[in-house]
Amino acid sequence: MKIILISSDADLLELCGEIVATFAGHDAQLSVTTPENCTLDGDFYIWDSPASFDFPAGLPRESAKHLFLLHRNEVARFQQNPDSVEAAILLKPATRPALAAFLGMAASSFHHRLSSTSALRADRDEILQCLIQSNLKLQEYDQDRTNFLARALHDFRAPLTATCGYCGLLLSQSLGPITEDQKEVLQRMEHSIKRLSRMASGMFELSVGRQLKRRPDLREADIRECVEQAVHEINPFATSKRISISTDLDSIPGVLYIEPGEIEQAIINILDNACKYTPRQGDIEIRGYPFFWERRGLQHSPPAEERRQMDTRTANSYRIDIRDSGPQIPREHLSQIFEEYTSYTGGQDRSGAGLGLAICRMIVTKHEGRVWCENTDDGPRFSFVIPSRRSELTMTKNISEATAEFSEVV
């Protein structure tokens, strides 16, 4: 199956490549082109906000062969165009689960077309059109909900910040002396408010992050300082459960360009999850070391551990491992634990509402890194890698480089 992406968006190409690479048994191939150079031999076409909806001459117009990624204000113009087809529409910014569902449906439809009769295809296409229209309405409602949630969370952050400031003022005893018991209560209040404030900020970022696509404010920084500050932030929570936290951080070869506050937030989220599910008097280990990361490898499995031991592999990233002594995560949920609002049933649901870990993945991804989780004999281990950089490198990818990478993966 030949999938053709008509787009100049390197991030979209990367996302499509990762999804297509997970297809099993479909022999799918992904290529990228422009509307002017679009070929006629594709089995499925993905159109990224085309300037016009005029198809190249001779291009098949079956609805099952096309997916349009459109901003909401482009939908009406598309549907009113007499030359358009009744293709599937996915509102931008496209999420990974939604795009994966559409591409998976296209792959299955392609193989069914090879064996189905014309009558069965007609019935299936009619049902498919109903589902496509229903899906579009659900996407519109979801965007309305997201916009409302973003506005509400923006309003929540101001009183939370003020309340945290009041707690700090009382703890400083500027308004008068306080007892040790009162101090302990205020410290717990301050910790809870900070945690709630971080969650509100993270939810706001998740709500608007895909639409704004804000690039991190990269600067040369020491990630070890981020780890130390995160441990300091989470220490009251760990102390209340008598959890010991140990750190072992190697020096960094080369330079890391990061946004310290963002990376610190990612580490805090992982530590918060670890503390929540680590039993009383348990332990948490933080390990940091230079690491060779094969960035063209598949995104759904951890990097090979032995790679960093090979002399021929020069470290090109820095890796943080956070292992805790809490319960292991069911294997079938390891790949979904960083998705938004993902959880699995059970008394020891490590993913909770999915917010903290989803925020963590969003931050690491913006730094062009990767985060994952594994079960070990001593408990779950959350890991992420951040690539080392030269000063002249930026976060912007060249489309030709992205194409070359995914031609090898897909």
Image (cartoon, grey):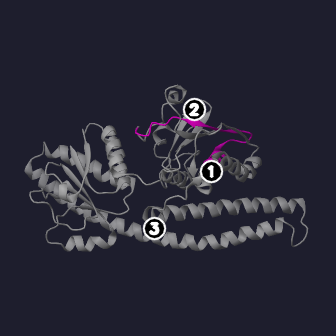
- Residue 3 drawn at (x, y percent): 23, 48
- Residue 183, picture quadrant: bottom right
Give the quadrant of the N terminus. Answer: top left
288 part of magenta stretch: yes
Q: Up-down: is 388 above or below 213?
A: above
Q: Which residue is mark 3?
A: 146
Q: Nearer the viewer, residue 134 or 247?
A: 247
Q: Nearer the viewer, residue 62 or 38?
A: 38
- Residue 305 drawn at (x, y percent): 52, 30
- Residue 38 drawn at (x, y percent): 18, 54
333 part of magenta stretch: no
* Residue at far front of view: 392
The tag on residue 203 is none
Report the amino acid beneath label 2.
Thr
At x 52%, y 73%, the residue is 151
Q: Is residue 22 visible?
A: no
Q: Residues within 10 Å of mark 3 (few under 14, many from 20)?
A: some
Marks 1 and 2, the one that precedes in the sequence:
1
Q: Which residues are magenta?
A: 270-296
Q: Is residue 169 visible?
A: yes
Q: Residues within 10 Å of mark 1 (few under 14, many from 20)?
A: some
Q: Which residue is mark 2?
A: 376
Mark pair 1, 2: CA separation = 31 Å
Q: Residues within 10 Å of mark 2 (few under 14, many from 20)?
A: few
Q: Which residue is mark 1?
A: 221
Marks 2 and 3, the one that precedes in the sequence:
3
Mark pair 1, 3: CA separation = 34 Å
- Is 223 situated left or right of 163 in this image? left
Pair 1/2: label in front: 1
Report the amino acid beneath label 3.
Thr
Quick one: SS at disc 3? Answer: helix
